[in-house]
Image: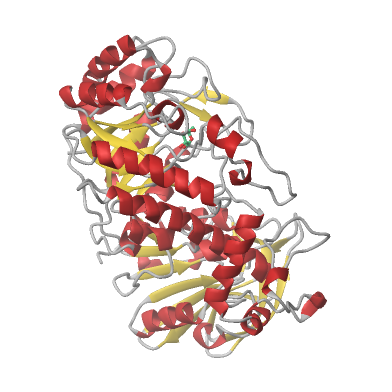
C-alpha cells in the first residue's frame, strides 16, 4: 500500500468540520494524515493543564474512517505560556538578538527548560496514544533547523568540543588557531561563532554546524526513546537545503523510515528537482542500511509554488502534481503526503495551497489530488536499483565557500547529466555496487573518504572527480596534492574565475566557468583541452578502475562522463 495524505491541523476548525473532513479524505483516497505538529498550546494550554479530549475525538474519527495517523510531537512550536516563563529558552541569533514568540521554530534545543518541557509533552502523548489503533507512525518535532548562539549553546558546544578534541591543545591544532591570535587558553574563552568583525575561522564555523546537528539529534533521540513505548515506527521530516543545520547522513540511521519534505522552488524545472530530492532520500535510506532504499515523502505542495526567483505564488499547471507524485513513487517513495489537508482560514500560511482550498472540494486542486489518490491506491512501493551514484556531501556543502559556485546547483547539473535513476549518496555509503560514481567538488575529504574513493577505483570502479576536490581535511586544513596519485596529475594551482569569465574548450561547443585547475599530467591521458592548451579533462587508470577529472565547471557536464557509463545494471 502507498501512503497518501498530508498534514491535518484540525485544531483550527470547529468539530463539525472534522466529520466532513474524514468523509472528504475517504473520497480523496487519503489513508494517512499527520496530526498535531503545531498543537502544543491546544494540548497543554497551561503549564500544568493538559487537554487530550479533542485529540481523542480526532483520532477516533480518523480511525473509524479507516485513516491512519502519523502522530506528531508538537515541540517545534512552544506555546506562549512557555515562552513567557522561560525567556532563556528562546533562540539568540549570531548578532545577539534574542527572538520572541510570534512565529514557530522559536526554541533553543540546549535550553534545559525547553528540553524538560519537550520530554513532558512527549511523555504525555506516548502514555495516551502508544497503543492507539489509528497510530501508524510517530513524527517527532518538525523540520529541525533552528540555530541558536546563546549561553546554553556555548556551554554545550564546549563540552561537544572537549569530547571531540580531548583538550585545548587538540582544539587549537584542529582550528589552526595559530593564525590571527586565536589560541585558546581556557575553555571558557571558546564561544559559538557569533557576529564578529571580519572573516570567521572556517573550522570553528564548520564545527558549530556539526555541533548544532548533534544537539538537535540528541533532542530527537530523547523523544524517540520516550516513543519507544509504542510499536509504531518513529521518524522526523528532513528538510532539504544548504541552510539546514542537520547532517542527514548521520541522522538517517536514527529514523525508522527516512522522511523528507520537498517543495518545488519554481514552476519550471519541476521534475528534475523532484527526481534529485527523491534520489537523495533514497541515498539516505541506503546510508542507514535500508537496502530497499524506501523512504516517505512527508510533505509536498499540492497545488502551488512560490517561484524562488520572483517570489510569486501560483498554481501548478494541471498534471504537474501527478507527474511529481509519480516521480517520487518511481524512485522508491512509500507514500506521497502534502502540506496541508485543509487551507487555513487565517494565520501565517493562510494562502499556502491545500488539498481542500478555501473554495472547498469543488475545485481543480481537490479533483486532481483525489484522482491521484485513486491512482496511487492501485500501486505498491517499488525497490529501485541504480547503476550510478552521485556523492553529495553535507560537510562539503557547509564548508565550501566559493562565491558564484553553488555546490547544490553543481550536483543537480551532474544528476541531470548522468540521467535515469541515480543514488544520491553521502560519502559514507559503500560504493562497490556502482558501475559509476560521480563526486563533484568534493572539497572536504577526510582520510576515510580518500580511502573509500581509492578502494572503489582499485576494485574496478569508474570515478568522476572535478575541480576543487580534496582541498581540505576534516578540520578545513589545506591538503595540497591529496588527490594527485588518484587522478594521475599534479594540481599546480587553482584559478577561481571572475563572474562572466569563461574558458573555451577545444573541439566542444562549451565553455568552462567559475573555476579551472591548472594541471600537469603525470600518468593520466588528456581527453580535452582548453582552447589555450590547458588540460581540462583527464583519464587515469588506477588499479582495476579508472578516474576522470574535469578541471572546470560546465553548464552541461556530460562531456566529463565516460561514454560507456550509460545505465548498465548494478
Ligand atoms: C514546511 C513545514 C510546514 C509548512 C510548509 C509550507 O515544510 O513543515 O509546516 O510550513 O513548510 O510550505
Q: Which residue of the protein is positioned furthest toward the front in this rendering?
A: 48
- Residue 413 pos. (x, y %): 51, 54
The residue that appears at 37% across and 50% down in the rendered structure is 223
Instruction: Judge from the rendering whether residue 237 lies leftward or rightward of residue 98; answer left or right.
Output: left
The quarter of the rendered structure image containing the N terminus is top left
Q: In the displayed structure, would residue 297 be above or below residue 279? A: above
The residue that appears at 18% across and 37% down in the rendered structure is 379
The quarter of the rendered structure image containing the C terminus is bottom left
Q: Nearer the viewer, residue 239 or 387?
A: 239
Q: Nearer the viewer, residue 221 or 373?
A: 221
Q: Nearer the viewer, residue 417 or 213?
A: 213
The residue that appears at 21% across and 48% down in the rendered structure is 382
Q: Is residue 380 visible?
A: yes
Instruction: Judge from the rendering whether residue 310 lies leftward or rightward of residue 69; answer left or right.
Output: right
Q: In the displayed structure, would residue 130 be above or below residue 384? A: above
Q: Quadrant of residue 161?
A: bottom right
- Residue 346 pos. (x, y %): 52, 16
- Residue 70 pos. (x, y %): 29, 37
Q: Is residue 507 visible?
A: no
Q: In the displayed structure, would residue 499 be above or below residue 119? A: below
Q: Nearer the viewer, residue 363 or 124?
A: 124
Q: What is the number of callouts on the image? A: 0
- Residue 337 pos. (x, y %): 33, 34
Amino acid at each position: 500500500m502507498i501512503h497518501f495524505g498530508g498534514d491535518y491541523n484540525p485544531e483550527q476548525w470547529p468539530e463539525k468540520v472534522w466529520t466532513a473532513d474524514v468523509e472528504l479524505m475517504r473520497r480523496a483516497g487519503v489513508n494517512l494524515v499527520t496530526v498535531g505538529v503545531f498543537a502544543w498550546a491546544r494540548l497543554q494550554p497551561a503549564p500544568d493543564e493538559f487537554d487530550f479530549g479533542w485529540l481523542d475525538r480526532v483520532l477516533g474519527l480518523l480511525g473509524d474512517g479507516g485513516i491512519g495517523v502519523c502522530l506528531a510531537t508538537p515541540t517545534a512550536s512552544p506555546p506562549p505560556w512557555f515562552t513567557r516563563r522561560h525567556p532563556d529558552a528562546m533562540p539568540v541569533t549570531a548578532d545577539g538578538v534574542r527572538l520572541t514568540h510570534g512565529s514557530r521554530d522559536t526554541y533553543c534545543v540546549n535550553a534545559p527548560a525547553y528540553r524538560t518541557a519537550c520530554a513532558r509533552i512527549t511523555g504525555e502523548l506516548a502514555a495516551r496514544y502508544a497503543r492507539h489503533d489509528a497510530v501508524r507512525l510517530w513524527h517527532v518535532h518538525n523540520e529541525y533547523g533552528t540555530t541558536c548562539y546563546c549561553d546554553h549553546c556555548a556551554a554545550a558546544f564546549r563540552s561537544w568540543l572537549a569530547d571531540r578534541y580531548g583538550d585545548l591543545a587538540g582544539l587549537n591544532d584542529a582550528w589552526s588557531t595559530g593564525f590571527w591570535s586565536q589560541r585558546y587558553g581556557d575553555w571558557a574563552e571558546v564561544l559559538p561563532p557569533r557576529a564578529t568583525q571580519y572573516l570567521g575561522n572556517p573550522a570553528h564555523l564548520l564545527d558549530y554546524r556539526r555541533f548544532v546537528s548533534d544537539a538537535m539529534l540528541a533532542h530527537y533521540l530523547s523523544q524517540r526513546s520516550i516513543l519507544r513505548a509504542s510499536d509504531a515506527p518513529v521518524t522526523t521530516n528532513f528538510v532539504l537545503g544548504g541552510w539546514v543545520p542537520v547532517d542527514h547522513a548521520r541522522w538517517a540511521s536514527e529514523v525508522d523510515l527516512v522522511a523528507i519534505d520537498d517543495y518545488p522552488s519554481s514552476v519550471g524545472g519541476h521534475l528534475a528537482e523532484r527526481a534529485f530530492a527523491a534520489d537523495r532520500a533514497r541515498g539516505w535510506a541506503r546510508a542507514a542500511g535500508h537496502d530497499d532504499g524506501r523512504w516517505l515523502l512527508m510533505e509536498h505542495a499540492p497545488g502551488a509554488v512560490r517561484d524562488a526567483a520572483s517570489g510569486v505564488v501560483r498554481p501548478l499547471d494541471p498534471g504537474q502534481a501527478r507527474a511529481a507524485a509519480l516521480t517520487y513513487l518511481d524512485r522508491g517513495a512509500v507514500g506521497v503526503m502534502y502540506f496541508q489537508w485543509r487551507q487555513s482560514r487565517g494565520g501565517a500560511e493562510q494562502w499556502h495551497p491545500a488539498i481542500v482550498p478555501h473554495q472547498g472540494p469543488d475545485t481543480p486542486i481537490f479533483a486532481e489530488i483525489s484522482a491521484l489518490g485513486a491512482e496511487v491506491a492501485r500501486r505498491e512501493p517499488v525497490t529501485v536499483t541504480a547503476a550510478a551514484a552521485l556523492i553529495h556531501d553535507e560537510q562539503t556543502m557547509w564548508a565550501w565557500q566559493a562565491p558564484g559556485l553553488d555546490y547544490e546547483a553543481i550536483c543537480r547539473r551532474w544528476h541531470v547529466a548522468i540521467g535515469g535513476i541515480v543514488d544520491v549518496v553521502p560519502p559514507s555509503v559503500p560504493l562497490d555496487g556502482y558501475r559509476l560514481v560521480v563526486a563533484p567538488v568534493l572539497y572536504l575529504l577526510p582520510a576515510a573518504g580518500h580511502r573509500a574513493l581509492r578502494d572503489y577505483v582499485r576494485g574496478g570502479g569508474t570515478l568522476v572527480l572535478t575541480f576543487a576536490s580534496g582541498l581540505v581535511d576534516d578540520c578545513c586544513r589545506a591538503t595540497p596534492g591529496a588527490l594527485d596519485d588518484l587522478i594521475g596529475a599534479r594540481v599546480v594551482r587553482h584559478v577561481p574565475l571572475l563572474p562572466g569569465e569563461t574558458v573555451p574548450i577545444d573541439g566542444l561547443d562549451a565553455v568552462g566557468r567559475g573555476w579551472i585547475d591548472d594541471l600537469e599530467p603525470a600518468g593520466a591521458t588528456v581527453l580535452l583541452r582548453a582552447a589555450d592548451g590547458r588540460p581540462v579533462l583527464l583519464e587515469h587508470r588506477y588499479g582495476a578502475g579508472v578516474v576522470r577529472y574535469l578541471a572546470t565547471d560546465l553548464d552541461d557536464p556530460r562531456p566529463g562522463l565516460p561514454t560507456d557509463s550509460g545505465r548498465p545494471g548494478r
